Image (cartoon, rainbow, N blue to C red):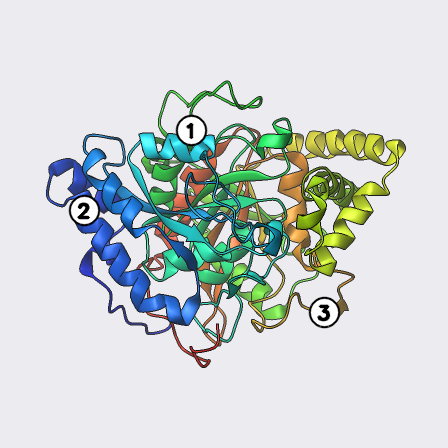
Amino acid sequence: MRPDTSFSGPDLCALSATEVVNLLRKGAVSAAELVEASLTRIAQVEPAVNATVTVCADRAREAAPKAAGTDLGGLPIGIKDLTPVAGVLTTMGTQGLKRNYPLASDPLVLRLEERGAIVMGKTNTPEMGAGGNTFNAIFGRTRNPWNTARNAGGSSGGAAVSLATGEVWLSHGSDLAGSLRTPASFCGVVGFRPSPGIAGGGPAAMGFANEGLQGPMARNVADCALFLDAMAGYEPIWPLSMPAPPTPFAKAAAQDPGPIRIAFAPDLGGFAPVESDIADLLSDAMTRLQSPTCTVEDACPDLPGLEKTYRALRAFFWAALPGDAPDFVQGFYKPTLAQNIAEGRALSAQDIADAQLNRSALYDRMQQFLTRYDVLACPVTGVAPGPVEEEFPRTVAGVPTTDYIDWLRFSFLATTTTLPSMSLPVGFTPDGLPVGVQLIGRPRGEARLLQVAQHIETALALPSSPIDPILRHDIAQP
């Protein structure tokens, strides 16, 4: 059950993105009013949570009158601080870029602005997006709004918190090792990692990379689908770009899903440990979903070589991107990031070939498995949010972790196989911390995944309204 919470922000901030966009289209509210409401809420909660670390007040106010008549109509959003916004401080969480003001925006930002999104600010991220706890040497720690002594997950931690506290209605994120999914689970919001090419491109320097992807975050499934529609569409600048679907994602998500079959794998066939409170909560949620039109079965395909394959792909990605930055940037990198880059540089041609071959074999297994099920459900992480000062948990269910990504094992499968996946809130731990379930869909199965998620959200009937931060620390110490 959701803990008792309050919300003291502007009434507009408590509405869903879908509700607000409908008001904008009717002329019942203006983009300028939304910008001021967002700025008010940011000022209220930032001292406690440190989520939106660069605020674009003047830029947002200037954009508001120009957004009328667009798809989103002037809806304020957050952009993760890995993604360039023209003229706005974009640090990527590293001291070597602490004075970086890009001349040009990322193409996805341009697309969102053309479709009526207003950038309210940049949300906090760990250095270069590396890690499941959002902190860096420039802006400090982002805190979990459900307990500010706990961390918000990462690397889209600032984005998740900006949603959970009502600073914005939608917030942009990205994902390699659960960077959308982990903070969504930890903060009680929705995080969606789409298939490659659905929501813009990967990093500009590696346009063919399909491991690190951008995606939408929202407070409920309908809002997430709305945001995905705003991101979708073919653009030749992105090598892997896909056209938008004939039926918008928001419309597909609202359709009757018909019979649903869910495969539930609480530890991914022994691949990842999970704490008992997380396992029990997810099992209870799956039991509550059982109905004549929704069946849940314990099932998981064999996943041979998944860990080695994912780690090779990830290490190659890091060596080619942060590992190719100028020396004056790399000189500031935290030890865990430097370690990942070193592992990438040490890969042999055979290591990379083996990873690509096994990746294809894993995809084949998942594709065949998902002909029998609509989604594979599993944990997002095996633990609840830990202390904000702890970079990563040293054990999960009594099993020692080997490094800073070992505890994120549940994220490896969707990334490796490029399948769409998402984190959906399903409940709370006994001490009041949110928990999400990870849903992995069929190849290019975004629409069906959203339909299933909408059914689960409706069946479990969890509220998705924002909250005031629950203070468990001295807010003078970010």
Q: Position of residue 275 (x, y in %)?
A: 64, 68
Question: Toward the viewer: 340 or 231?
Answer: 340
Q: Nearer the viewer, mark 1 or mark 3?
A: 1
Q: Earlier in the sequence, mark 2 or mark 3?
A: 2
The residue pinned by badge 2 equals: 32
Q: Taking 123 as reference, is 225 above or below it?
A: above
Relative placement, left or right, of 200 versus 11 is right
Q: Earlier in the sequence, mark 2 or mark 1?
A: 2
**Residue lying at 61% horizontally and 49% vertically, measured from the top left:** 128
The residue pinned by badge 1 equals: 232
State the image quarter where residue 359 is shown.
top right
Q: Position of residue 328 (x, y in %)?
A: 68, 49
Counting labels gives 3
The residue pinned by badge 3 equals: 395
State the image quarter where residue 455 is shown.
top left
Q: Amino acid at mark 1?
A: Ala
Q: Determine the secondary structure under disc 3.
A: strand
